[in-house]
Amino acid sequence: MRNKKNLYSLILSVCLMAFTLKEPLKNKIYLIGDSTVCDQPIDRYPVTGWGTPFANYFDSSIVVDNRARGGRSTRTFLEENRWQPIVDSLKPGDYVFIQFGHNDEAKEPQYAARYTPVPDYKRNLIKFINETRSKQAFPVLVTPVSRRVFKNDQAQETHAEYTAAVFEIGKQLNVPVIDLDRQSRDLYQTLGSVDSKLLFMELDSAEHPNYPRGQHDNTHFNDYGARIIAQMVLNDIKAQHLPLADRIVKRQTTAGRQLK
C-alpha cells in the first residue's frame, strides 16, 4: 500500500512539474512589406528597416516575425509564395502588419517586374486582410513610409495614390490604419531639409566602412531613423487603443522628444 501511495505521489509530482514548466501562450506579430520594414543583412549596415527595432518593445508574450523583404511589392510577395506560409502558420490572436507601396508604385521600365497598378494593389491588400481574419488573427494596415523629398523647404508627398488606396481598403473592411506616410513627412518637415538627413542613409565618403564611397539614399533609414519610425508605429498602436498596446513595455520617444 505504501509503495502504491509513493507511486501516486510521484506521478502527481511529475504532472504538476509538467504543468508548471509549460511555456506561456505567445502570440506573433508578422511584418510583411519591403526594404523600409525588413531586417537588413549585416553588410548593409547601418541601413535598417523599422521592423528591426520594433521587435524590441514588447513583453515576452509577443514574438515579432519579420517576413518583409527588400524590393517586394504586394504582387511579388504573393508570386514568390512568401504569403502562404504565413497564412498556414497564423494562430488566433496573432497580428499581421501590412506595409507595401514603395515597389508597387515603381513605374520605371527597370522595375516592371514589381510594379502593381492601384486596383491590383487594393485586391492584394484585401487578400492579405481576409486570409488573416480567416485564421482569427488581426490585420493592421500601414501606409508606405514617406521618402525624404523637399521642394522650397516643404516636405513633399511621395505616395499619394497608394496611401489613399490603403485608407480606402481600411475603411471598406474596418481595418486599423497607421499613417506612416503623413507622420514621417510631418517629422521631416519639423526637422527641416538638413537635419532630416540624420534619419537616412546619407553618408560621406569614408564615413562608414560598408560605404567607402559614401551613400545618398533618401528612402532607406539608418539605425537611428528606423528606431524613430518604429516608435511612430508603437505610439499609433497606443493612440488607437489596439489590444496589442498592453503588450508594449517600453516608452517611446521621437526625434528626442518624449511622447505620452
Image (cartoon, rainbow, N blue to C red):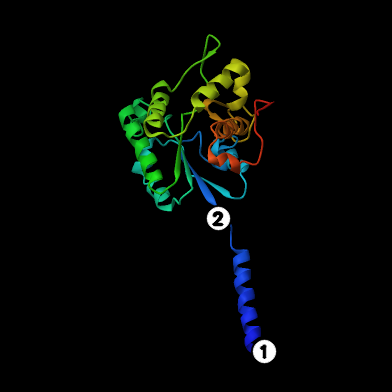
Q: Is residue 194 shown above or below 80?
A: above
- Residue bearing mark 2: 25
Q: Amino acid at mark 1?
A: Arg
* Sequence-first disc among 1 and 2: 1
Instruction: Please tell me which residue is depicted at 62% across the width and 81% down the height of the picture.
Output: 8
Q: Is residue 68 shown above or below 232?
A: below
Across and down, in percent, residue 141 comes to 45, 34
Q: Nearer the viewer, mark 1 or mark 2?
A: 1
Near-viewer residue (148 or 108): 148
Instruction: Determine whether the residue tagged by mark 2 lies in a helix, strand or loop.
Output: loop
Across and down, in percent, residue 129 comes to 39, 39
Q: Tell me the crowding category of disc 1: few under 14, some 14 to 19, or many 20 or more residues within 10 angstroms, Cα based.
A: few
User: Residue furthest toward the front?
Assistant: 1
Residue 245 image label = none
Q: CA distance from mark 1 to mark 2?
A: 39 Å
Instruction: Please tell me which residue is depicted at 51% across the width and 22% down the height of the picture.
Output: 182
Across and down, in percent, residue 243 comes to 54, 41
Q: Is residue 84 shown above or below 9?
A: above
Q: Amino acid at mark 2?
A: Leu
- Residue bearing mark 1: 2
Instruction: Determine whether the residue tagged by mark 1 lies in a helix, strand or loop.
Output: helix
